[in-house]
Image (cartoon, rainbow, N blue to C red):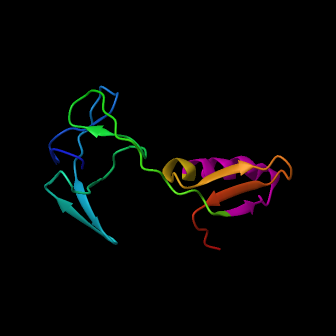
Amino acid sequence: MHSGTLTSEGQVFVAGERKGQRPGHLLKLRGGEHAEIPGGQAGDLVAFAKLDFKIGDVLLAKAGEGRIAMPKLPTPMYSLAVEPKARGDVEKISGALQRFAEEDPCFDFVRDADTGELVMRALAINT
């Protein structure tokens, strides 16, 4: 939280949107543990259960405009080509990779124009 306070009874607005969302359960994440907390204040890191936000969304206490610059993110360092077992699976794989890219700003994928391979790039890849 950048400034102010928030309780589970309040509302949060994504910058530029008029419709607010009630956070419900506020959580403090500590490793694998998720402890419910009554509220948060400036400087706290809080998580919301069951709300749909995207990385980079700025949440406000009132409807309106607000902006906080995203920090510079690391460039993906590892690449791995993936190949579907069947031709019909190309769209399924592309859809799944698109969802990963939406959730992780340090992950992307491209179809290499020269080889036709689907190449995913990330900070680290477990094989």
Residue 87, horizontal then vertical, whole percent:
81, 52
Tell me residue 38's x, y (percent): 13, 55
Residue lying at 67% horizontally and 57% vertically, measured from the top left: 120
Question: Hey, which quadrant is residue 77 in on the image?
Answer: bottom right
Q: Name the residue located 25 percent from the left edge and 28 percent from the top edge.
A: 63
Between 1 and 96, the residue placed more toward the observer is 1
Q: Main secondary structure of the magenta part?
A: helix
Marks counted in the figure total 0
Q: Determine the residue positioned at 60% across, 47% down.
A: 98
Residue 58, position as x, y percentages in the image: 33, 40
Residue 1: percent from left, percent from top: 24, 50
Query: Looking at the image, which residue is at 42% across and 50% down?
Result: 71
Q: Is residue 97 left or right of residue 103?
A: right
* 106 displayed left or right of 24: right
Residue range highlighted in magenta? 79-99
Give whichever of 70, 114 is nearer the camera.
70
Q: Tell me if 72 is positioned left or right of 94 in this view.
A: left
Q: Residue furthest right?
A: 114
| Camera-side residue of 42 and 109 | 42
Residue closest to the eye, 70 or 84 = 70
Above or below, 114 against 123 in this view is: above
Examine the structure image and report whether residue 72 is included in the region drawn in magenta: no
Q: Quadrant of the C terminus?
A: bottom right
Above/below status of 15 relative to 100: above
> Is 82 covered by the magenta stretch?
yes
